[in-house]
Amino acid sequence: MGVSKQVLPLGNPFRSIAGIYDAMSILISFGLIGMWRKRVARMLAVGTGEVALDLGTGTADFAIELTRVSAVGARIIGIDLTPEMLVQARRKVYLQGLGTRIELRVGNGEQLDLPDNSVDLCCSSFLVRTLTDLEQGLQEMWRVVRPGGRLVCLEVSHPPQPILRALFHGYFYNCAPLFGALLGQNLSAYQYFPQSLRAFPDAPQLKALMEKYGWKDVRFHYLTGGVVALHIATKKGSAT
Ligand SMILES: C[S@@+](CC[C@H](N)C(=O)[O-])C[C@H]1O[C@@H](n2cnc3c(N)ncnc32)[C@H](O)[C@@H]1O
């Protein structure tokens, strides 16, 4: 299966919207984003001595949620391409007294500065749709997860029910840029979000793509009618 690569005509949109990202996410999702992240974090609960990578950590809300439900001895690494998003993340992590439990780094999920087989869990919340090269990202995630480790991706998806799908597409493709404008920010930066979903595979296609890059036992669950999908997979043995 070939997946078209995202082209960012406007550069990295997260640079200009970092300051309003949290407010925008709540607005666009009608407040559901916090519930989705919490639900997934509760399923993961990282144990003492384990290392979890939160890829595309952004302003660190998912990493913080994960830390709350994990053992004190768990290590959470949050990596993000956009330094401006990490500025917001660092402030939040510091204010919540989690500085010793969450390590934040600038990095590229398509070319990770981490050794092979070095993390127990690679998770991401609303990252994979924004990768420039999704296939490269899935291979990199596979490389850094240890055999027996897990991959967990929470992402906006395409609802399987045709009417809901049409309604959701209509909403997401038209309203997100308007919300950006409402908050008085760069409207063009938010044009990227509808584009990112148009080019993004649906949940069964994403599952097939994960399998293509060596992920096993791949399964997915729709949340809120499939507006969002959660993919879970395991790394077994060596690369295929
Ligand atoms: C939609 S935000 C999600 C942020 C956060 N995980 C959340 O739950 O709100 C996507 C994030 O992925 C980051 N990102 C995009 N491409 C990336 C890449 N190749 N490597 C690492 N981070 C990336 C962006 O900078 C942005 O912070």
Image (tube, helix red, strand yellow):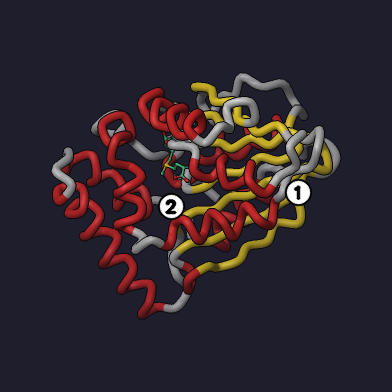
Q: Measuring 66% from the left and 22% from the top, which residue is drawn there?
A: 114
Q: Quadrant of ligand 1?
A: top left
SS for tag 2?
A: loop
- 127 horizontally vs 208: left or right: left
Query: Residue 107: x percent and y percent?
Result: 51, 23
Instruction: Name the residue type under label 1.
Output: Thr
Mark 2 or 1: in front is 1
Within-10-Å neighbours for mark 2: few <14, some 14–19, many 20+: many
Nearer to us in this view, 78 or 236: 78
The residue closer to the viewer here, 171 or 162, is: 171
Quarter placement of the C terminus: top right
Residue 62 vertical placement versus 77 (above, below):
below
Mark 2–mark 1 distance (CA, rounded to whole Å): 22 Å
In the image, which disc is placed on residue 200?
2
Q: Is ligand 1 closer than 8 angstroms to the Cβ of mark 2?
A: no
Question: Which residue corresponds to mark 1?
Answer: 234
**How many labels, in total?**
2
